[in-house]
């Protein structure tokens, strides 16, 4: 429901309610003002009954494979961990920062036009005339999945993940990311945004 942070610019302790944090899809005030605040305390309001979101296709498949008809929060947690471990490389074994691109938010009209050209395009309606496009689908459809440029590459199982096969520099990873961004913009007319904070 809120948090306490130290404002590094003023030295003051600042209280933020949930709205002031400006949380959004992989975004927040703290991400946009990186380095300004140090979060010291977080306050949560826990609910006594779980409100599980089970719409994600792979989650439904995992629960079905395990013959779980009425999942508990622990079942969902186990499922999410299992799904992530199948799709994402272990950073201890293969250098990566997880998902490298955000799912782009576009006007519904653009999503509809792209869907006419690509009927299997994965979209997520957002309301307000907006839709999210699956960045991983765009990257994979453009042929980048499994691509390698020296020691920088796109993971062979998850197109959203850029990997370091050993000696790639940060500059080389970013160069690959920019090549992907330019190609996606040219092919689909959509701009991908890098998710990790680049320092």
Image (tube, helix red, strand yellow):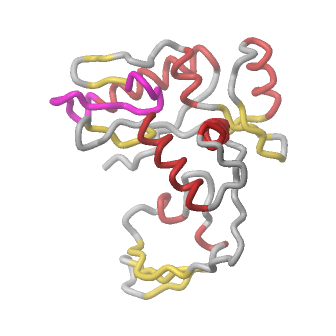
Describe residue 124's horizontal placement relative to residue 136 as left or right.
Answer: right
Q: Nearer the viewer, residue 6 or 101?
A: 101
Going 81% across and 24% down the picture, which residue do you hit? 112
Which residue range is magenta in the image?
A: 155-172
Q: Is residue 166 magenta?
A: yes
In the rendered image, which quarter is residue 40 located in? bottom left
Q: Relative to residue 159, is residue 34 depicted above or below?
A: below
Residue 39: percent from left, percent from top = 42, 76
State the predominant SS element of the stretch in magenta.
loop
For the point 53% across and 14% down, the residue is: 142
| Of the pair 121 and 199, the residue shown nearer to us | 121
Q: Position of residue 136 (x, y in %)?
A: 54, 28
Residue 13 sits above or below residue 194 on the image: below
Instruction: Name the spot of residue 118 as percent of width and height, x first.
Output: 71, 14
Asked if residue 104 shows in the view, the reply is: no
Does the stretch in magenta take in 165? yes
Quadrant of the image containing the N terminus? bottom right
Which residue extends farthest front?
67
65 left or right of 129? left
Viewer-proximal residue among 66 and 190 = 66
Tell me what residue is drawn at x 41 percent, y 21 percent: 179
Q: From this viewpoint, which residue is outermost toward the left?
A: 167
Please name the residue shown 50% across and 79% down the image. 42
Camera-nearest residue between 22 and 94: 94
Q: Is residue 84 left or right of residue 28?
A: left
Q: Is residue 114 visible?
A: yes
The picture quadrant where one finds residue 152 is top left
């Amino acid at each position: 429901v809120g948090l306490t942070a130290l404002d590094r610019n003023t030295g003051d302790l600042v209280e933020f309610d949930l709205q002031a944090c400006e949380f959004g899809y992989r975004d927040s005030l703290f991400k946009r003002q990186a380095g300004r605040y140090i979060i010291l305390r977080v306050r949560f309001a826990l609910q006594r009954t779980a409100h599980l979101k089970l719409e994600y296709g792979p989650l439904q498949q995992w629960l079905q494979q395990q013959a779980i008809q009425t999942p508990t929060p622990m079942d969902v947690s186990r499922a999410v961990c299992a799904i992530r471990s199948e799709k994402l490389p272990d950073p201890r074994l293969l250098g990566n920062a997880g998902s490298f691109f955000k799912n782009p938010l576009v006007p519904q009209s653009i999503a509809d036009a792209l869907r006419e050209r690509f009927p299997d395009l994965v979209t997520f309606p957002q309301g307000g005339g907006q839709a999210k496009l699956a960045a991983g689908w765009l990257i994979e459809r453009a042929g980048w999945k499994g691509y390698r440029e020296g020691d920088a590459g796109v993971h062979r199982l998850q197109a959203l993940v850029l990997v370091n096969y050993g000696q790639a520099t940060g500059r080389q990873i970013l160069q690959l990311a920019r090549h992907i961004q330019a190609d996606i913009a040219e092919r689909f007319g959509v701009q991908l945004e890098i998710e990790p904070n680049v320092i």
